[in-house]
Image (cartoon, coloured by chain):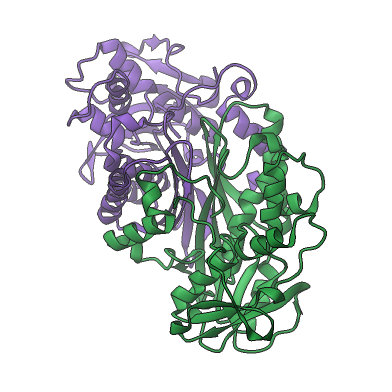
Chain colours: A purple, B green
Amino acid sequence: MATSKRFSKGSLSDLGEFGLIRRWAHKLPLLESGVGIGDDAAVLPGPGRKKILFTTDMLIERHHFRKEWGHFSWLGQKALLVNISDISAMGGIPKYAVISLGLSDCPVRLMDQLYVGFNQVARRTGLRIVGGDTNAAPCLIINVAIVGEVAGNPLLRSGARVGDWIYVTGTLGSAALGLKKLQSGKKITNDPLIRRHFLPPIRTDVALQLKKRRVHAMIDVSDGLLADLSHILQASRVGAELWPENLPRLRGSGFSPEVMRKAQLTGGEDYELLFTHPGLLPTRIAGVPITRIGRCHPPQFGLKLKGKCDTQVSFQDYLGFNHFKA
Amino acid sequence: MATSKRFSKGSLSDLGEFGLIRRWAHKLPLLESGVGIGDDAAVLPGPGRKKILFTTDMLIERHHFRKEWGHFSWLGQKALLVNISDISAMGGIPKYAVISLGLSDCPVRLMDQLYVGFNQVARRTGLRIVGGDTNAAPCLIINVAIVGEVAGNPLLRSGARVGDWIYVTGTLGSAALGLKKLQSGKKITNDPLIRRHFLPPIRTDVALQLKKRRVHAMIDVSDGLLADLSHILQASRVGAELWPENLPRLRGSGFSPEVMRKAQLTGGEDYELLFTHPGLLPTRIAGVPITRIGRCHPPQFGLKLKGKCDTQVSFQDYLGFNHFKA
């Protein structure tokens, strides 16, 4: 789930996205039956010791992207990559995808670019696109559902324990800064931040390595570091201290230090892995940088930012995304 | 796939929906790897002799429905039922669903009705809703993806043989007439046609019985009888004669005989089963009426309508839906 425009004041906007999910999960018992509600992918029984993972994500024009930004092949890639990220974050391997399209009239050339993007990701990851649904629509809509598989137990948000270290892969904030550049009307070139906004990393291999190293809890950073860390803390019933000064540096972005720090803590759509582990891990696994950024505490600790010399930092201003909440 | 507004002249509209699918399937080799492209659901390897079925369908406001028609619980049911129909048409059992929502701001009460509809279907069918994605959107969008399973080989469109009889379950045309009533501004009451437009039948049980009786080819009637029969004929490389006079009667609809006959032959969204079988079947299986409506011939026969006394009838006027083709 990614940055979306907020609703105008009134009804759904009062509830917020997570409020709506909680409301339904509470009122409608069937929704509680899957591991899916509240984790990156649902976990279904599979053959032998394997389990099947099942996830879906929708990209909607004007809310997740704008047609005038162009680069439909990147957009096609992104639609698959955000779903692959959900499977990776559970320690699984993406296997099959179905794609529903809502298409507003536009040159067939652009639609072809979209599909070139789908296929680039399919080739890189071994994912097979096996079906779909195509409809006319008032705007471009891309919905992907992916079936993956995981050997043994998947990595959940709920596994963090007091004393675990908190780690993150790669860098955080680039995608949000890329979005800022796009929104400011900057033409898409090979700007690395814009590229990063469209092209989330594939973290399947490092996730498999982390699973072997017995990571306790894992999630992908889609809503922003603070929001997604909160998901782990809530599901695991632990508290945590977070060290913003340890976050991997964003280089040469052309933004002020404040904007960059805010992007690191609350920027969505980085699709890096956020996880907890009881031990000290190497700084690079499967070629991907790993950074230790905090530690888990008992639940009453809450979530605190710690600066240098163990000083506490306010983080009231740094809340993650909520699609509907005003 | 269901009735959608057509695109304005220009680009995608020149190609048509099926043209677009063919173009992609031709240009992009990965799309050919699944049984999915061209069948109701993709067929994936499963545990033991079982196979996994995977399908997706999207409903979009203003194209598949209008908010002012109300009855969000019916809409929620429909979003699942059209996907269940795809699984049933392959001889499978629906097991798990993920639901992506694009929500424009509206009373939470209506959203609750939508979810009540999801759960009604889940309870009736044993389907488990295990996850989803919720986004703000310029209009209401409901995308469902379902994983099902089938014992042994699924029923495909490509199995029809020369000499097979052609059968259909239930009645055809009601959903299209219901849509006509809705479009004419008629308030939703318990009108059986309007009800039928929103609530496709669940044909899982009769499909399982038909699979046991070794049906050769099967498809659900989503695009209209002529269009979907053509899909079977193309995939199976056979021709056919169709007996419109044998089609199950539509009663008390208040429409002219011409309108009703056209709805029977070309009306979409009935989600009945259309299948071929070499033998004579009973007129009711698993409580569902079965009607013999034609016979398969060699491919050079094409598709012909036969009236009483074996007279040939023109069917040029009776083409099925094509979402994009002008």
Q: Is residue B186 left or right of residue A324?
A: right
Q: Quadrant of the C terminus of chain A?
A: top right
Task: Report x, y in % for residue A247.
Answer: 29, 24
Residue under the point 75% across and 53% down = B193
Task: Give the quadrant of residue A129.
Answer: bottom left
Q: Is residue A308 left or right of residue A252?
A: right
Is residue B26 shown above or below A100? below
Q: Nearer the viewer, residue A286 or A38?
A: A38
Task: Report x, y in % for residue A136.
Answer: 47, 45
Q: Is residue A71 left or right of residue B251?
A: left
Q: Would you say residue A286 is visible in this rendering?
A: yes
Q: Nearer the viewer, residue A124 or A79?
A: A79
Is residue A314 shown above or below B166? above
Q: Nearer the viewer, residue A292 or B287?
A: B287
Q: Is residue B314 left or right of residue B263?
A: left
Q: Quadrant of the N terminus of chain A?
A: top left
Is residue A65 shown above or below A94? above
Is residue A164 shown above or below A30? above
Q: Nearer the viewer, residue A246 or B35?
A: B35
